Image (tube, coloured by chain):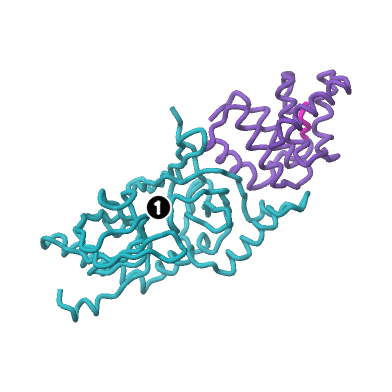
Amino acid sequence: MNFQHESLVKGLFQLVWADDVVTPNEVEALVTVLTHLGYSLPETICLLDAQLAAPPPTKTGLPLDQLFGPNLPSRDELKLLLMIGFSEGSIGPEQLGYIEGLILRMGLTSAELEELRVEAMRELSP
Amino acid sequence: MSSASKRNSPRHNLRFSVRSRDLPGFRAITCDLSQCGTQLETSGLLTEGTELVLDLEFDREELQDFSCPARVVWASEVPGDRDFRAGLVFLPEDDAKRSMLARMATVLQARSESDLDELLEEAKRLDPERARTFTRVRQQTSTGRKVRRVLPALGVLIPLQICIDGYQWDGGTRVLTVTFSDSQGAHQLQFPYCRILTDYGCVLNPGVTGLYSTPFSDAIKKLPSPSPPGGWKHYRFLMADRQPILELVSAPCRPVRES
């Protein structure tokens, strides 16, 4: 199993569970993102099987900026988070709540964030 | 065996894997099985009168795998179904083989009269429980956006684009290893403590579009305690029409390290 992206992967599952709704589009986006991160197909299957069976126990009260601690994600990692957040076309308020602290700490301008969002949406399109 | 005893040899509609170097694709699935012979589902038409050695593989610990020569008595194509059937008569060449066939018949008969049979067949029937499950699967894969996620209560549907190449059962460790391939190559998944396995025709190598996993099913309810680490899961590899091609109950699956 790939432990290199442990925080990021935890964040991805926190995001999809943020609104208690995990849609097929979000599951497909997770498959795409985990493949991007270098997870093999069997590893991806096992991760989804384990993590989507029930909401994470720390689902509430742990925004992503706390999850990442002092190590902020890279721009590419944030893009992967945005791919999950925008997998339904628009990001929900619960998911935005999880991710906005991270964006603030990273000091992204709205233009940079929009650029990232467009990139994320492009990578999600089939 | 006399013709009278042949008539008395009951057939059991059970699906087991059969391998032979003389079979198309080197493998087949039994449609029914008796002490005298078997009906096979094959991926190509067999020639009547051909003699071949069948390796019978049973997924139950009470039955040991064994090989037996057999002759093709009849063979035909299933109209419109793109698959083939053949009836074969076993040709045991010695007492050891006859003994294995007799034991197989005894175990299958005992099984058909026991709860175990019900458990096995449970996985095959499109029963009300499964009908509900698949309704949920369809709901989740419908076009509606932001459908309230009901899958976690019942299971997870993981989208895939794979073909199942085969599976291997280790009777000692009770681990089933499923080999499948996608555009990136071949992969393997292990299913520890595998208790129920139903193959609906992997030999035909159809495309698999999803893996549905649930910790809730009637088959799981009937399994004896204690459950394995991580609990039981009922896995179904689904084709495009959402019908299962392979299903099993095991502990949570785990990846096989890829080189």
Q: Position of residue A116 (x, y in %)?
A: 79, 25
Residue beneath the point at 66% across and 57% down = B138
Q: Is residue B10 left or right of residue A107?
A: left
Residue beneath the point at 66% across and 37% down = A30
| Magenta highlight: main SS | helix
Q: Which residue lies under the disc numbered 1?
A: B203
Quadrant of the image occupied by residue A46: top right
Residue beneath the point at 72% across and 52% down = B149
The N terminus of chain B: image quadrant: bottom left
Quadrant of the image occupied by residue B59: bottom left
| Stretch in magenta | A62-66
Q: Position of residue B135 (x, y in %)?
A: 65, 62
- Letter of the chain shown cyan in the rendering: B
Q: Is residue B27 left or right of residue B129?
A: left
Task: Determine whether the residue tagged by mark 1 lies in a helix, strand or loop.
Answer: helix
For the image, the number of numbered tags is 1
Q: Is residue B74 above or below residue B161?
A: below
Quadrant of the image occupied by residue B43: bottom left
